Amino acid sequence: MPLFSARNLLLAVALAAIPLLPARAAGMEGRPAPAVTLAGADGARHSLVELAAGRPTVVLFWATWCPYCKALMPHLQSLLDEYGADRIEVVAIDIWEDNDDDWKSVILDNGYDFRVLLKGDALAPQWQVRGTPGLFVLAADGTVVFDRNAHQFTPVRRNVAGISAGQGNSAKAARAAPLWAAALRKVLDAELAKGADSVAR
C-alpha cells in the first residue's frame, strides 16, 4: 500500500480539521444550573431559583473541614456586603459532613449572613463537584457563567518552600482565596453590567 493512499490522506485531512481541545474543559460554564432544593439553615426548604430571585448568584459547595472553603468565606461575605443583597446572592451548600450540625461552627460563629443550604451531597455529582470548594457564578437567568474547575489558577509564589508541613493547606488556602474572590468580582461586574445595559435599553 502506498504511504499516502487516498484513504490515509482523507484520514489525515479529517484529523487536521478537528479543533484542538482546550487544556481544561469549561466544566459547567454555559449550561443551566442543575436544580437545587434543600433544607436551609432556617429549617425550611428552599430552591436555588427562589434564593437567587433573578440576581447573579455565587454558589459555593463547601465543607467545614475544607481550609480553602473557610479561607474563601470571608471574601464571599465581603462581596455580599459590597454589592448588596439586592444585587447579588451568595448560596453556600454544605456537603460531606460527619454530623448534621457541623456547619454551625463556621457559619454562626463567624456571623456570615449568606444563604446556607444543608446536606447537598447528592447534588455534588450533578454540578461536577469532585472536591471542595466547588465554586460557581450564575447569571440572572440561571446559566452557569463561572466554574472554578475551568479556571485553575497557578499563583507565582516566591516562597513556596517557606510553607511548612504544619501550615500546609491552610497557608495555601490563604493565598488562593483572594485570587478566587478577584475572579468572582470580575464575573459579577460583567453580569451586573449586562443587567444595567438591558435596563438602559
Image (spheres, helix red, strand yellow):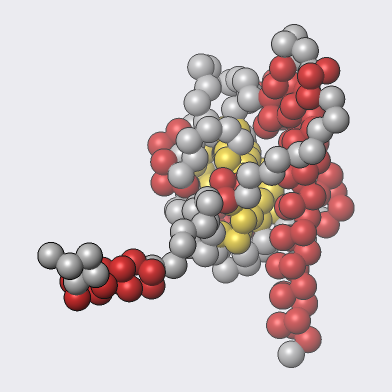
Q: Quadrant of the C terminus?
A: bottom right
Residue 194 shows in this picture = yes
Q: In which quarter of the image is residue 194?
A: bottom right
Residue ID at (38%, 72%): 17
Count of all numbered marks drawn on residues in the image: 0
How far from the left and from the top, in percent, is residue 39? 52, 38
Residue ID at (31%, 68%): 12
Residue ID at (46%, 62%): 20
Specify the farthest residue to the front.
Answer: 2
Asked if residue 155 lies left or right of residue 126, the reply is right
How far from the left and from the top, in percent, is residue 151? 63, 49
* Image height of 55 relative to 37, above or below: below
Front residue of this view, candidates 107 and 65 = 65
Specify the farthest residue to the left.
Answer: 1
Residue ID at (78%, 64%): 189
Front residue of this view, candidates 197 and 176 = 176
Q: In which quarter of the image is the N terminus?
A: bottom left
Asked if residue 86 lies left or right of residue 148, the reply is right
Front residue of this view, candidates 161 and 147 = 161
Residue 106 shows in this picture = no
How far from the left and from the top, in percent, is residue 137? 63, 55
Asked if residue 132 lies left or right of residue 37, the reply is right
* Image height of 91 relative to 130, above or below: below
Asked if residue 42 lies left or right of residue 125, the reply is right
* Image height of 96 relative to 23, above or below: above
How far from the left and from the top, in percent, is residue 68? 69, 30
